Amino acid sequence: MAVSFRVSFKDKLLQELRAEAAAVSWEPRPARRPARRLVVAAGLVAAVTAVVAVAVPLASETPAFAVVKNPDGTVTVRINEFVRPKELEKRLREEGVRAMIDYVPYGQTCREPRGETVPQPQRMPLRRLDGPGFWIDPKDFGPDETLVVVMHSAAGDPAKSNGGGVGVIRGPVAPCELVPAEVSGADRE
């Protein structure tokens, strides 16, 4: 099983600084130029501080979604923003799950039926997590089955979902044709 790790910019910078510090000779020198050493050290500290000040906000940005293959073969999906659905579909496909993800404007949904729906009591391929995510087992899907997720954001805010649906379709899946959604009291903002 291949495991990939991403090294953040902050971690890479820290590794480079540690390597640089290890290469520096810490043996005492004659005290002929103390002012120059102090100026160089102050410049180095200022440069590191500036780089870290820029790197920390960049490193702390949350990705729109994360797809992680678990040791037991299941796949954990976390959605933080309802953007780039085709990228999420691609990542799921890489982990063995055919998916069609549609993020639609608030107050709209996809025209149904989009294909032959697999009854949910037969099995439940999607399990909710606490927070914005779920986990699935690719073995729960037949070779001709597709996970279909339709979500709409709350008042256009891509960080908040305000409803949608999840299902499994056997065979071809029709593209999403937008139609007005029926809004219940629970879905209103």
Image (cartoon, grey):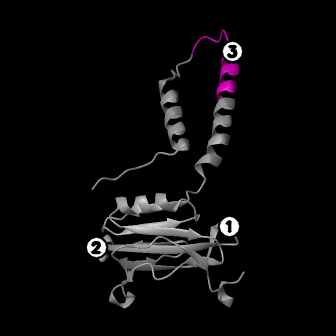
Residue highlighted by disc 2: 139
Q: Position of residue 143 (x, y in %)?
A: 27, 71
Amino acid type at circle 1 is: Asp
Q: CA distance from mark 1 to mark 3?
A: 54 Å
Q: Residue at x 57, y 13 (%)?
A: 29
Of marks 2 and 3, the one in the foreground: 2
Disc nearer the start of the sequence (1/2): 2
Disc nearer the start of the sequence (2/3): 3
Q: With respect to residue 154, does 118 lie above or below?
A: below
Comparing 113 with 9, the one in front is 113
Amino acid type at circle 3 is: Arg
Label ID, residue 157: 1
Q: Secondary structure under badge 1?
A: strand
Q: CA distance from mark 1 to mark 2?
A: 34 Å
Residue highlighted by disc 3: 36
Question: From the image, which quarter does the C terminus lie in?
Answer: bottom right
Q: Position of residue 9 (x, y in %)?
A: 54, 42
> Is residue 153 shown left or right of residue 95?
right
**Span colored in magenta:** 29-44
Q: Position of residue 187 (x, y in %)?
A: 65, 84
Amino acid type at circle 2 is: Lys
Q: Secondary structure under badge 2?
A: helix
Q: Are there few (<14), some (14-19), or many (20+) residues within 10 Å of tag 3? A: few
Q: Position of residue 133 (x, y in %)?
A: 50, 71
